Amino acid sequence: MTGEQPEIALEETGSKGRYVLRAPDGAEAEMTFSKVGERQLIIDHTEVPEAFRGQGAGVRLVERAVADARAAGKTIIPLCPFAAAQFRRHPEWADVLRKPKS
């Protein structure tokens, strides 16, 4: 996949949701989450197919969740290893980070 990247769509159903990028060939990069009450999201999975590799699609998905959480006054618990790694790389996201209880 080359050229302009598609917009990120937000899909929500009850207490679950996902951010998704769709390629023209139908491939989807997604980051799924669960809602915890009104103020928290748990990012539980990120998947980026070959069509999106090397284009920063996974980071874009996490960035969108961070922006949405900020706008809504929510915090994020990144249980997904990829999302957790991105939070470690981006200390500027600390305002929306909520670490899981051990």
Image (tube, rainbow, N blue to C red):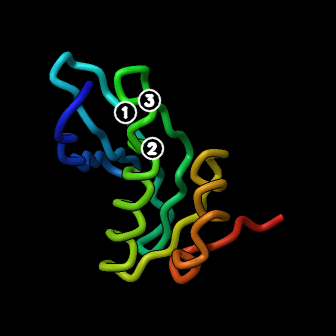
Disc 2 crowd rating (10 Å Cα; few below 14, some 14-19, many 20+) is many
Q: Is residue 55 above or below residue 101?
A: above
Residue 99 lies, in percent from the top left, at 69, 70
Q: CA distance from mark 3 to mark 2?
A: 9 Å
For marks 3 and 2, give the one nearer the viewer: 3
Q: Quadrant of the N terminus?
A: top left
Q: Residue at 38%, 50% (x, y): give it.
A: 61
**79 left or right of 18?**
right
Q: Which residue is mark 3?
A: 53
Q: CB atoms at circles 2 and 1 under 8 Å apart?
A: yes
Observer-nearest residue: 46 or 58? 58
Q: Which residue is mark 2?
A: 58
Q: Is residue 6 above or below residue 48?
A: below
For residue 2, the mark is none
Q: CA distance from mark 1 to mark 3?
A: 9 Å
Q: Quadrant of the C terminus?
A: bottom right
- Name which quarter of the figure residue 73 lies in: bottom left
Q: Secondary structure at mark 2?
A: helix
Disc 3 crowd rating (10 Å Cα; few below 14, some 14-19, many 20+) is few
Q: Which residue is mark 1?
A: 29
